[in-house]
Image (cartoon, rainbow, N blue to C red):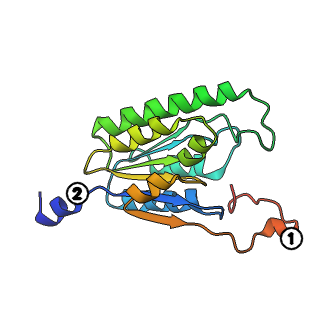
Amino acid sequence: MAKDEKNEKSKGLLIVYTGNGKGKTTAALGMTIRAVGYDWKVCVIQFIKGSWKYGEMDGIKKLEPNVEFHVMGEGFVGIIDDDKPIEEHRQAARKAYDLALEKMKSGRYRLIIMDELSVAASLGLVFPDEFKKLVAQKPADLHLVITGRRAPDWLIEEADLVTEMTEIKHPYQKGILAQKGVDF
């Protein structure tokens, strides 16, 4: 292994994208594209999204075999068209949590993205001690990205990089609904 490769792998980062603005998942998926450019193996696990069809589901398939994309959630909890019992969402989050732990321990990936994990935790679908345990088990050379609104203070403190997306203006404020290819 070349010296630069070894140095590059020596410290896996904990990266957090949080805040009320748009772009958290998009930023994480941008990292996915960059990582595939270096022939990295990437795993994306979505903890919340799941009931809608959106572009990244098909787009990410074009990055196979370097990228695995797992939609584990049962959709947005308690909003829009959600009529599922909270326990169904908890069970889905439990499966996502177990899969995330398995993928982290496998040693197969340079980058793992846990999309909407902060939201799952803030809704009580993943308990705080489980969330901390998951992050604590991150291998030293793995880059781990966690997205979602309301990232807990301990995660922000622990992270190597934290970006907060702040909404300044949104088309919905003008009555413009979400658009295919831009918003989903």
The amino acid on which the numbered mark 1 sits, given as a three-letter code, is Lys
> Label 2 to label 1, Cα distance in Å?
46 Å
Q: Which residue position holds label 2?
A: 9
Q: Residue at x 60, y 63 (%)?
A: 23
Residue 4 or residue 161, whichever sits in front: 161
Q: Residue at x 80, y 31 (%)?
A: 83
**Residue 28 against residue 140 in the figure, above or below:** below
Disc 2 crowd rating (10 Å Cα; few below 14, some 14-19, many 20+) is some
Q: Residue at x 65, y 31 (%)?
A: 89
Q: Which residue position holds label 1?
A: 174
Residue 149 or residue 30, whichever sits in front: 149
Give the quadrant of residue 172: bottom right
Q: Residue furthest right?
A: 175
Disc 1 crowd rating (10 Å Cα; few below 14, some 14-19, many 20+) is few
Q: Quadrant of the N terminus?
A: bottom left
Q: Position of residue 162 (x, y in %)?
A: 46, 64
Q: Position of residue 15 (x, y in %)?
A: 42, 58
Dots 2, 1 in contact, CB < 8 A: no
- Left or right placement of residue 173 versus residue 135 in this view: right
The amino acid on which the numbered mark 2 sits, given as a three-letter code, is Lys
Residue 122 or residue 27, whichever sits in front: 122
Q: Position of residue 106 (x, y in %)?
A: 30, 35
Q: Quadrant of the C terminus?
A: bottom right
Q: Dot 2: what SS?
A: helix
